[in-house]
Image (cartoon, helix red, strand yellow):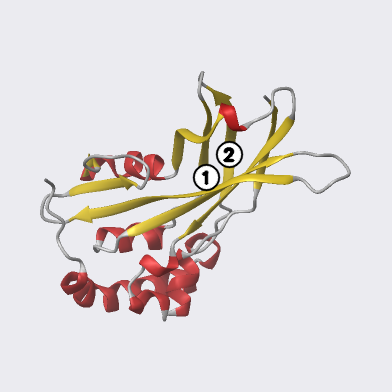
Amino acid sequence: MVRQHGPAPLIRQVFPMLLLAVVTLSLMAPGQAGARDAAIRDLFVTNTEDEVLLYFRVSNTFTSAMEEAVLAGITTTFIFTIELYQHRGIRYDRKETTIEVRHSLKYDSIKKTFYLSHSYLPGEPRQFPELEMIRAQRAMADVSGLPIVRLDRLVRGQPYYVRVRARLDKAALPQDVRTTMLFFSLWYFETDWARQDFVY
């Protein structure tokens, strides 16, 4: 089983220096330090014989401030909210289901390894060596083949649509980050809703 090293001691040592660096960067190049337009991309709905599956990715999630903080030991968690509706024309659309899943990324500075956990997948976290940080970030922002509803709950021939939104989990951040507004503003994101229609 992978040992999870607690980030608290390291965070207390590194956070003041990290905050100073972020403030300096934001003052020197504010358009680069905090510029970001996170969005849902490549939203796609398909199915197996039994279930509806969802694919999408989130672009522009990691800023340089986030990367530095992750390397300092702060665990990052993305929350993906998925809603499935039956489109009913002039009547109110009917919500069939709401799903909320999480991806969490943690860096172990001793093993120099990133660990990526998915709330909907059993087993050990995926591991990425330090040199594959970009690959770990892409995997963090990617949802591939997520089952959202069984086909026997849907009506054949009826129109449906899926809405998806992604955001950073505020509650998972250390108190120091949540109470430091400048740092938090360079960290936090929430996408607009993205929609994909389909007919079963």
Observer able to see residue 87: yes
Q: Which mark is residue 59?
A: 1
Observer able to see residue 45: no
Q: CA distance from mark 2 to mark 1?
A: 7 Å
Q: Amino acid at mark 2?
A: Arg
Quarter the N terminus occupies: top left
Describe residue 194's horizontal placement relative to residue 15 as left or right: right
What element does badge 2 sit on?
strand
Describe residue 149's horizontal placement relative to residue 200 as left or right: left
Quarter the C terminus occupies: top right
Mark 2 and mark 1 in contact? Answer it, CB < 8 Å: yes
147 in relation to 125, above or below:
above
Identified at 56% across, 59% down, the residue is 190
Residue 51 image position (x, y, % from top left): 51, 27
Q: Amino acid at mark 1?
A: Ser
Residue 71 image position (x, y, % from top left): 26, 58
Q: Nearer the viewer, residue 164 or 9?
A: 164
Identified at 38% across, 60% down, the residue is 66
Q: Residue 159's image quarter?
A: top right
Residue 183 image position (x, y, % from top left): 43, 73
Q: Nearer the viewer, residue 144 or 134?
A: 144
Q: Residue 75's image quarter?
A: bottom left
Residue 32 image position (x, y, % from top left): 51, 60
Q: Nearer the viewer, residue 22 or 76?
A: 76
Q: What residue does disc 2 label?
A: 41
Identified at 41% across, 76% down, the residue is 178
Which of the marked residues, 2 or 1, is nearer the chain's N terminus?
2
